[in-house]
Amino acid sequence: MIWSALLDDLGTLWRTQRTRMLVTLSGIAWGTLATVLLVAFSRGLEEHMADAAAGMGPSIAVVWPARTSKPWRGLPDGRPVRATEDDLLALAGAIPEIGALSPEFTAAVTLQRNGRVQRVGISGVRPEYGPMRRVVPQRGGRFVNQRDVDERRRVVFVGDRVARELFPGEDPIGRRLVLQGAPFTVVGVLQPKEQNSDYVGHDANRVFVPSTTFAAAFGARYAGTLVFRARSPGEQRVAIDRVYQELGERLGFDPSDRDALSVWDTVEDEELRARIFVAFEGLLASSGLFTMLVGAVGVANLMFVSVQRRRREFGLLLAVGARPAFVGRLVLLGALVTVALGGLIGILVAEAVTAAVRATPLTEAIGRPEVSWTIGAGVVGVLVIVGLLSGWAPARRAARLDPVEALAS
């Protein structure tokens, strides 16, 4: 019975207060649209930035031996810190918090192939380096493996841009190129990836060889970089502290000397980015909530006008035996349905806008905004609260009407 009465109530409201109802619906729809769009675009941008940052490798730490700033056991400060590959590999067994690590030797080299010459950066690494740094081979190829390292093989893994320039229109796998005057066999090509941060250049423009091959070819004794990842992001800070302690003992510097090693902890970057976006989304959601609350005032005003205009009708219902709670629920449901209709319009428009943006090249700059279930559930919860707040006072007034006075009016 209450639903048929509700439909009659809304029909009467539409016929008598059409302009006011349209304005109210527009306010709720606009508040919902603004909230959903802002949060959807914010999350799309956050995921886009996270993916681009993870192109260098998720949750890794990059360590460069630097120069001491404190005396240590009779040794002066200002000494350069140098670490061999064995020094860095020993950390894996000494620090249980480390999940994977790889020393890295770097240099700039000249590549030649069929008259084409290219100057690129080269890294001598271990097999663990690939998964940590998201250096993923295209189908048919592979990254440096342990046998390459043990046997000092002359194999090379090339970035996708390097492959396009040296092997235009060809499959580079199994072909040879000349690296610093020596022939190397291409065993893999980088799968294209998005990368917005680096420390020696984007991987697409680099080549990678076994660390032992690099040391033999260039006569390198000391590694320039250590790349490692803790077993879990929560252990990264502990692992970094242990790296200072272990290398301090092995290389002769004060473990408390933070200048002896230069460390880039990407876990800190990830946490900072997450906090920034949480605050940003909170600000956007608050702005949208305020807009919807303003719309709630319009709904409440609409319901008050409806109760005032229908005093005799409500008085008649009460006079023939309808309970006051029934009349109150009728008004409250009217407010909820009005808010729900405005919210539905806003959500549908937001979905159409985000779908249109996803079909454009804008996604390369701002990510892929989507109206997710979590956003939708949050907005529905807010709409329910807004509907209850806007309908409670008018419903209370309608339920407290005196039948005799209402009929007399």
Image: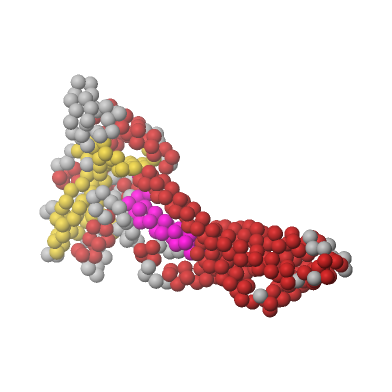
Name the residue nearer the viewer: 284 or 129: 284
Check the image and tell me how it is coloured.
secondary structure
Boundaries of the magenta span = 36-60
Q: Is residue 202 left or right of residue 292?
A: left
Check the image and report above or below for 369 versus 125. Answer: below
Q: Name the residue rendered at 75%, 71% in the picture.
A: 310
Residue 362 image offset from top left, x and y in percent: 37, 68
Q: Main secondary structure of the magenta part?
A: helix
Q: Does 279 sit left or right of 52 as displayed?
A: right
**Residue appearing at x 22%, y 44% in the figure:** 105
Query: Could you say where residue 224 lies in the image, as x and y percent from the top left?
Result: 22, 41
The quarter in which the N terminus is drawn is: bottom right
- The reply, left or right, for residue 245 in relation to residue 308 is left
The residue at the point 44 percent across, 54 percent down is 280
Give residue 108's position: percent from left, percent from top.
16, 51
User: Horizontal placement of 59 versus 345: left or right?
Assistant: left
Residue at the limit of the structure toward the right, as seen here:
320
Q: Quadrant of residue 62?
A: top left
Residue 346's x, y, as percent?
A: 55, 68
Residue 52 lies in the magenta stretch: yes
Q: Is residue 65 magenta?
A: no
The answer to whether one can see residue 86 in this image is no
